[in-house]
């Protein structure tokens, strides 16, 4: 074997890599997990809060409109609860429509020209924290208010012209 071949063979078998080779991958994965887990959790939480915000906003608006256009008190309540229940269920919010809704009026809600204010509020639980439920408060309250004015020229007495 020639001298050059022996030199190449000896050169190839010696370890010339630094002792920390390959640690960058491990460090990258560790830092990526430390940053990725909170970002994913934050995204899930903000998504649930945004869905609840859309739900209560639509529920309050439609409930006020349902009461303002109702013919009598029984149908007003029935239509209001149906509107709130549908809006909350549409966004995946699990709440009782009757317990989440508050209606206030100046006088009689069905009087011509009456101002009807509806407030819908729910509590959104934080995802993945069911095991801490009794220790710390883990729900974010989300509330929306809508106002509607009953038509001044509405027919009274339950009949429509």
Image (spheres, rainbow, N blue to C red):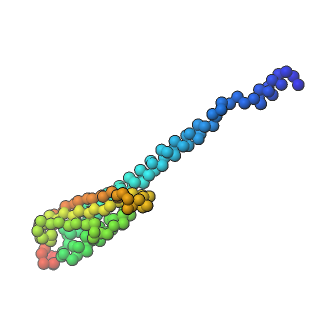
- The answer to which of 4 and 141 lies nearer the viewer is 141
Asked whether 81 or 98 is in front, the reply is 98
- Quadrant position of residue 99: bottom left
**Taking 140 as reference, is 156 left or right?**
left
Q: Position of residue 144 (x, y in %)?
A: 26, 59
What residue sits 68% from the left and 30% below the top?
Answer: 17
Give the quarter of the image for residue 153.
bottom left
Residue 121, horizontal then vertical, whole percent: 28, 62
Quarter holding the N terminus is top right
For image coordinates 33% across by 67% down, the residue present is 95
The C terminus - image quarter: bottom left
Q: In the current view of this chain or complex, which residue is farthest to the top?
A: 3
Q: How many marks?
A: 0
User: Measured along the vertical axis of the image, is residue 105 above or below residue 127?
Assistant: below
**Displayed quadrant of residue 9:** top right
Q: Is residue 90 visible?
A: no
Point 34% across, 58% down: residue:
137
Percent of width and height locating residue 140: 33, 57
Q: Is residue 111 left or right of residue 24?
A: left
Q: Which residue extends farthest right?
A: 1
From the viewer's side, name the closer residue of 160 and 69. Answer: 69
Q: Is residue 12 above or below residue 28?
A: above
Q: Is residue 26 left or right of residue 49?
A: right
Which residue is depicted at the point 59% across and 41% down?
A: 26
Is residue 75 shown to the viewer in this render? yes
């Amino acid at each position: 074997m020639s001298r050059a071949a022996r030199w190449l063979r000896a050169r190839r078998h010696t370890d010339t890599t630094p002792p920390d080779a390959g640690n960058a991958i491990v460090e990258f994965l560790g830092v990526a997990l430390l940053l990725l887990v909170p970002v994913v959790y934050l995204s899930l939480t903000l998504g649930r809060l945004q869905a609840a915000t859309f739900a209560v906003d639509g529920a309050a608006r439609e409930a006020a409109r349902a009461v303002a256009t109702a013919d009598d008190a029984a149908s007003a309540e029935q239509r209001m609860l149906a509107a709130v229940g549908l809006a909350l269920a549409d966004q995946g919010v699990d709440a009782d429509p009757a317990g989440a809704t508050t209606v206030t009026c100046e006088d009689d809600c069905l009087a011509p020209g009456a101002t009807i204010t509806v407030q819908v509020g729910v509590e959104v639980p934080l995802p993945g924290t069911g095991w801490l439920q009794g220790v710390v408060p883990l729900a974010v309250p989300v509330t929306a208010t809508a106002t509607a004015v009953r038509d001044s020229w509405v027919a009274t007495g339950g009949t429509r012209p």
